[in-house]
Amino acid sequence: MTETKQFLSLHLLETLAAVLPVRDENNAPKTIVYGGFERHMITSQARRRAERMHARDRANAGKGPLSGRTMGQRTREWALLTARVLETAHGWERDEAVLTARTVLEGVGLKFGDPAKKTVANLTKVLLFAPADTGERIAAHIAENADELRAWRDEYLELQAANAKPKRGKRTASDEPETVVEEGREKKLPPLPKESRAKVLTALAPRDAIDIALYGRFLAEIADSPNVEGAVQSAHAFTIQEAETVDDFYAAADDAKLDRKKNALDFLDAADDAGAGMTGYQSLISGTFYRHAVLDRTQLRTNLRAAGMTEPEAEEAAVAAEQEFVTAFVEAFPEAKKNSTASTGSLPGLVVAFEGDRPYNYAAAFQKPVNENPEDRGGEGPAGLAGVRRLLRHHAFVADRRPDIRAVRLLTYDPQVDALLNELSPVRATRVKTVEGLTS
């Protein structure tokens, strides 16, 4: 049996028309300059979230190789989620549940928003990626140790309020303006009981959440809560041809206004209801994008073992996670403007997957943008097909010089690309018809 290589490299070309998957702070398409030309960009953050949510939703729905396995949730609302369980499952009053959950999480080191602002008072300052059942576990522990934790909470909050009050002091006569010399120091807040701290940290720990093992987690606020080095590397996607943006003018109709106009008895009444209900502009982009991602199989198994799995359990989970990761890479898409552009229905023109001793990024194949104008000297025609030619030519060149590259697989959902693959010089690769065929 051939040894499995450490890294699985994925490369993908997809053509999109009139979409807006990501925007900047001005609602404009995101771009980068590469090879001296501006390109449209879909950020790796947008891609990773789309892929992570795709895998999580399938697992929670009982679909795919991760069906039934623990998945993570990234949110600032862990205090509210814990309080909801205390309220619905353990009979606590809502206000006390929220106050207690927030205080307990503060006790392990998490920081919350300004208490004076209701919108953020009970939200952590950072997004925390933790297993989806974290709130249930914390709530169960609070309910089980209610008397002890209520007493600790009251003492904690009382001292916290006392420390926040302006300190009494004596004024110095010579200072201009007057200054206050503080008398006394803030009293140290009581630590969360040791057993409770351990239980909450265990609940917040990555444990067996597969998507945390895949994408990693960094939590600086709690020194003794483990961080996770992600097993997935994601590159920003960019167009292989020069960026072009269309500012699409739109006019939205007001149904009631048009009904009155339709039934108007004379032209004066009809004139009163002329014009659109709302107008505006939206930017839309088109192009063929190159996408790249890498899975570090060794890191994935390390993360799963660190979560407490035995070696056979980690191996089984890693194989399932790899299959679902590849599926999400191929099928998931950022959902911005999905209803008005149907962007999530796109399928890639070509996917190239292979194993190696290190990652391989083929962005250099498109440093020179594709010239789609067939009338220009050197024009390559439509970017989708031109990109396939370039990508495979680049891969063949690299693979001829890097003997560790093996198990090359190709998948296409485009009949034109399929026909082109038949015409090109033979590439040492296996052509597959399903996403599952892309990985061993």
Image: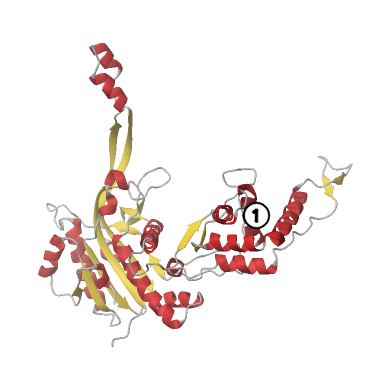
- Which residue is nearer to you in this view: 237 or 296? 296
Residue 360 visible in the shown view: no
- Residue 171, picture quadrant: top right
The residue sitting at the right extreme is 173
| Above or below, comparing residue 394 to residue 168 in the picture | below
Is residue 118 among the parts visible in the rendering?
Answer: yes
Identify which residue is drawn at 29% across, 27% down: 255
Return the residue nearer the eye: 101 or 123. 101
Residue 247: give x, y in percent of width and height.
Answer: 29, 39
**Residue 411 on image: x %, y %:** 21, 67
Q: Residue at x 63, y 69 (%)?
A: 198
Q: Is residue 84 above or below residue 193?
A: above
Counting the numbered discs, the total is 1
Up-down: is 53 above or below 165?
below
Residue 278, picture quadrant: top left
Secondary structure type for disc 1: helix
Q: Which residue is identified by label 1? A: 100
The amino acid beneath tag 1 is: Thr
Could you tell me residue 155's position as x and y percent? 75, 56
Query: Which residue, as the protein is rendered here, is positioned at the far bottom?
Result: 1
Q: Position of residue 112 (x, y in %)?
A: 61, 53
Tell me the quarter of the image containing the C terminus: bottom left
Coloring scheme used: secondary structure
Query: What residue is rendered at 81% in x and 55% in y?
Result: 185
User: Which of the 4 quarters of the picture holds residue 390?
Assistant: bottom left
189 displayed left or right of 386: right
Q: Does residue 281 appear left or right of residue 226 in this picture?
A: left
Quadrant placement of the N terminus: bottom left
Label 1 crowd bin: few (<14), some (14–19), many (20+), radius 10 Å: many
